[in-house]
Image (cartoon, rainbow, N blue to C red):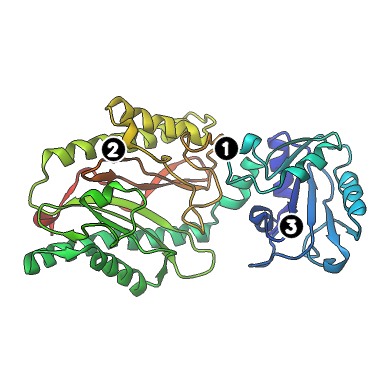
Amino acid sequence: MFDLADIQKALGEFGLDGWLLYDFRGSNILAQRVLQMPEGFSGSRRYACFVPAVGQPFKLVHRIESGVLDHLPGEKIVYLKWQELESALKTMVGSARTIAMEYSPRNGNPYISRVDAGTVELVRSFGCDVVSSGDLISLFESRLSDEQLQSHYEASLHTNAAYGKAWSFIAEQIRANGRVEEKAVSDVIMQHFAENQMTTYHPPIVGTGPNGGDPHYETGTGSDTIIREGSFVLIDLWAKMQRPGAVYSDLTRTGYVGTTVPPQYSKIFDIVAAARDAGISKVKSAFAAKQLLQGWQIDDAVRAVIEAAGYGQYFCHRTGHNMAQETHGNGTHIDNLETHETRRILPRTLFTIEPGIYLPEFGVRSEVDIYIHKDGTVEVTGGPIQTEVVAILSEY
């Protein structure tokens, strides 16, 4: 539901005069979601909605598609010529001077940069200061409803259980046949998802040895995809319940095919786990102290542990990502590597913390999901946090 009062409250809190939501042919999916456009809508003409901090919104639509924003409150302006569009935009923003749009200075955060430079230039020509709507997007795109949170909890039960299925299957196959294909393990996980009415956009990553050292490895395509006794195995899996609005669970854990885990694996795992825990601690301490927390700050806290251990060059991706209806959601990411994520970590949002060290011989990643409750309570979801590499042949 498009909640005008909620949006205007946020505009006041963020010190903004208004929010200009603009789209052309589906180029701004973020605006579409805030404006509650129908699933799959793209349209053929430009449209916009300006929500001022105080007062009623303005809706700008083309004569050919004049009804596309009729579900929203506010005064409708219909244009035909391009000159009318520009004049109407100027009228809509009025005396507002600080206006949020889906824009990021220097494209520092491409997840937010959905409005073309020319349109930003046009709005600035009205005497407006265009600023990023990043925090607004995090607020209205990634906050979970109670029902969505419950769907995440339900998904988390099944993703957590998937590891028991996978480790047991590996142990059974090793004892019976001495080997098992990565793809076969992936298939067992996918069957588990199907049996529990779950869906995912991509099968899990099951990587053995050097394959696990590739953060985006495609299971079953490496030079050696056979898991044997003595293999180190990384499994990254994600899925959600198969119903509208459901929210993902996304976890990564590691195991060793043996009865005891060799020190070279435990050493790297312990560094990664310490980095993960430093990130969790950073989040908890900030919310306990009611301090503003931005995505880059968590990334720095996590990365510092791995760099101090001498493995900084082997941690080659951001620390985590927002998660909602997509596994990589549109809210605040945990990143100061690929982008300088200055958006805030907000209550009722969900994100991952997933540091990794990727060596030529093997890779370790430990991924957990973090939910911030309305009152600022920080919860790690997805079952018990992994504290050591699973010794598959002694535990299963």
Q: Say which element carries label 1.
A: loop
Give above or below for 339 relative to 150. above
Please say if 340 is above or below 242. above
Q: Residue 44 occupies which quadrant of the picture?
A: bottom right
Q: Position of residue 99 (x, y in %)?
A: 76, 39
Q: Which residue is mark 3?
A: 24
Name the quarter where the C terminus is drawn: bottom left
Q: Residue furthest top?
A: 308
**In 3D space, how far apart are the residues under numbered discs 1 and 2 (Cα atoms)?**
25 Å
* Lower position in the chain sequence, tag 1 or tag 3: 3
Alpha-carbon neighbours of circle 3 within 10 Å: few (<14), some, or many (≥20)? some
As helix, strand or loop, the secondary structure at mark 3 comes to loop
Label annotation for residue 272:
2
Q: Position of residue 383 (x, y in %)?
A: 31, 53
Q: Nearer the viewer, residue 114 or 197?
A: 114
Real-space CA distance between mark 1 and mark 3, rounded to the nearest whole angstrom:
25 Å
Between the residue at mark 2 and the residue at mark 3, the CA separation in whole angstroms equals 43 Å
The three-letter code of the residue at mark 2 reads Val
Q: Which is nearer the N-term, disc 1 or disc 2?
A: 2
What residue does disc 1 label? 343
The earlier-in-sequence mark between 2 and 3 is: 3
| Badge 2 vs badge 3, beta-carbon distance below 8 Å | no
- Relative to the observer, which residue lies in front, 330 or 376? 330
Compared across the picture, whether 193 is left or right of 82 comes to left
Q: Residue at x 10, y 52 (%)?
A: 230
The one of 137 and 383 positioned closer to us in this rendering:
137
Position of residue 113 measured from the top left corner of the image (x, y, whole percent): 64, 45
**Residue neighbourhood size for the residue with mark 2, other residues' Cα within 10 Å, grouped as few (<14), some (14–19), many (≥20):** many
